[in-house]
Image (cartoon, helix red, strand yellow):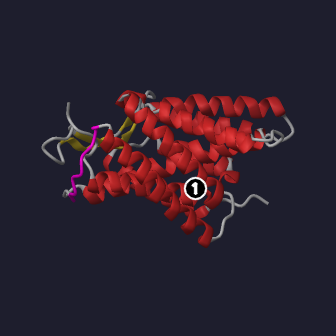
Amino acid sequence: MLVLPWPYLTLLSAGYVLALTYGQLTAQASIAIILLLLAGFAARQHHYRYGRYVGHILFILLALALALHWWPGFYNARMIDNERFTEDAVPFSMNLNLDKPLIGFWLLLVCPWIVAPHSLTQTLKSSALAISLIALATLGGAWLLGIVEWSPKWPEQAWLWINNNLLLVTLVEEALFRGYLQGGLSRRFQHLAYGEHLALLIAALLFGLAHWGAGWEWVLLASLAGAGYGLAYRYGGLAAAIATHFGINLLHFGLFTYPMLAA
């Protein structure tokens, strides 16, 4: 019997309601949704291996288009527009995205195995340890590289940022990079002696490369963070990876230059 990860779907639904409240959709967006449904149907064909391959390939292509906001028909409301949270920071903008959350819905509905069962104790311990180590490595590294400075703050947009980052960014990214990529590759590489480590490394590097537009420093730091999120996922499950990722983002937002120092 298929057991769906309802807590995650509920959180993602809350985020999608938040985005829908401020955004708009057109008929073009419905094409992406239909294609995702077809990809999900194909990926669930257990008796037809090539059908599963086609479903997952179609999903990966759609996920890329949705994550990069290439698919037309999604009017993502701009909620923060070129705001400087500190005088020395790069201006920051934030949209409530309607396209990216569809990736998370697909993964949770079609691949519920990305939510491996872990106890609350395991999740809390893994999250706490991972946040501590990753904060030292990445936020400390960013400070040493001269791209952020100590800058405690709590701007008026903080709660909107928190809801967006947790529900529409972190949950989706961890479901994709840790649950789908790392978890899927771990299953694929289970016959290898170091298959789990290889899966973690590949997912972490791809996560780092996703930050290419911010510069090589952020690629390096995001790859390190991705490895830490991967360890949190391995020992504490998807909830630990989400909590760790969000915790690091919140520390960055609240205590350091956000998103980075202006040149």
Question: For the magenta stretch, what is the residue range?
Answer: 146-154
Question: Which residue reaches farthest right?
Answer: 47
Residue 66, can we see it?
no
Q: Residue at x 51, y 47 (%)?
A: 172
Q: Position of residue 87 (x, y in %)?
A: 12, 43
| Mark 1 surroundings: few (<14), some (14-19) or many (≥20) residues within 10 A | many
Name the dominant secondary structure of the magenta segment: loop
Q: Residue at x 55, y 44 (%)?
A: 227
Image side of residue 160 versus residue 88, left or right: right
Residue 45, can we see it?
yes
Q: Quadrant of the C terminus?
A: top left
Q: Measured along the vertical axis of the image, is residue 200 above or below residue 245?
A: above
Q: Quadrant of residue 158?
A: bottom left
Q: Residue at x 78, y 31 (%)?
A: 51
Q: Position of residue 105 (x, y in %)?
A: 56, 48
Instruction: Identify the amino acid type marked 1.
Output: Ala
Q: Quadrant of the N terminus?
A: bottom right
Question: Which residue reaches farthest front?
Answer: 144
Q: Which residue is mark 1?
A: 232
Q: Position of residue 170 (x, y in %)?
A: 46, 50
Front in this rendered view, residue 190 or 97:
190
